[in-house]
Image: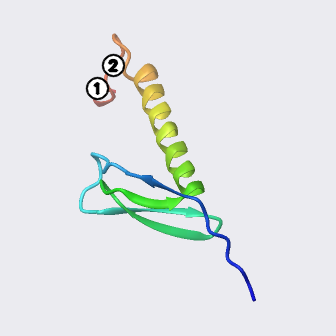
Amino acid sequence: TEKKTEEERVMIIIPKPNNVVGDTETMVGINGKMYQIEYDKPVMVPKNVAEVVMQSRALQAKIAEEVENSVLKPGKKAIADL
């Protein structure tokens, strides 16, 4: 018989982004397996899924910071003015 190993699970909450309209969930894919996760609700997911979500959040924060530092500096023209 084949034994399935129990994956360690952790609870995560993915806040709904301000720029998302209408959708109530997001998809996270790891090694060909897809996870449909509702926004703003606590869900139990495998630990590697939670790690991907946290890495994505960190990357989004870094991108936002880079955009703010390089594009939105005082004295620079606004994107709308270009």
**Residue 11 on image: x %, y %:** 44, 54
Q: Nearer the viewer, residue 2 or 56?
A: 2
34 and 23: which one is in front? 34
Kind of residue indicated by mark 1? Asp
Secondary structure under the numbered disc 2 in the rendered image: loop
Q: Which residue is mark 1?
A: 81
Q: Quadrant of the N terminus?
A: bottom right
Residue at 49% in and 67% down: 35
Q: Left or right of 78: which side holds 34? A: right
Q: CA distance from mark 2 to mark 1?
A: 6 Å
**Residue at the far right in the pictured view:** 1
Q: Is residue 6 above or below residue 19?
A: below
- The amino acid at mark 2 is Lys
Q: Judge the density around disc 2: few (<14), some (14-19), many (≥20) Cα neighbours within 10 Å.
A: few
Q: Secondary structure at mark 1?
A: helix
The image quarter in which residue 18 lies: top left
In the image, what residue occupies the spot 62% across and 69% down?
A: 6
In the image shown, does 73 or 55 lie closer to the viewer?
A: 55
Q: Is residue 73 above or below residue 39?
A: above
- The answer to whether residue 15 is above or below residue 38 is above
Apparent side of residue 61 relative to residue 48 in the rendered image (left or right): left
Depth order, front residue of 66/79 = 66
> Which residue is farthest left?
22
Q: Where residue 33 sits in the image (x, y, percent)? A: 58, 70
Q: Quadrant of residue 41?
A: bottom left
Q: Residue at x 59, y 59 (%)?
A: 8
- Circle 1 packing at 10 Å, graded few (<14), some (14-19), many (20+), is few
Where is mark 2, residue-wise? 77
Q: Pointers 2 and 1 in contact (CB under 8 A)?
A: yes
Q: What residue occupies the far bottom of the structure in this picture?
A: 1
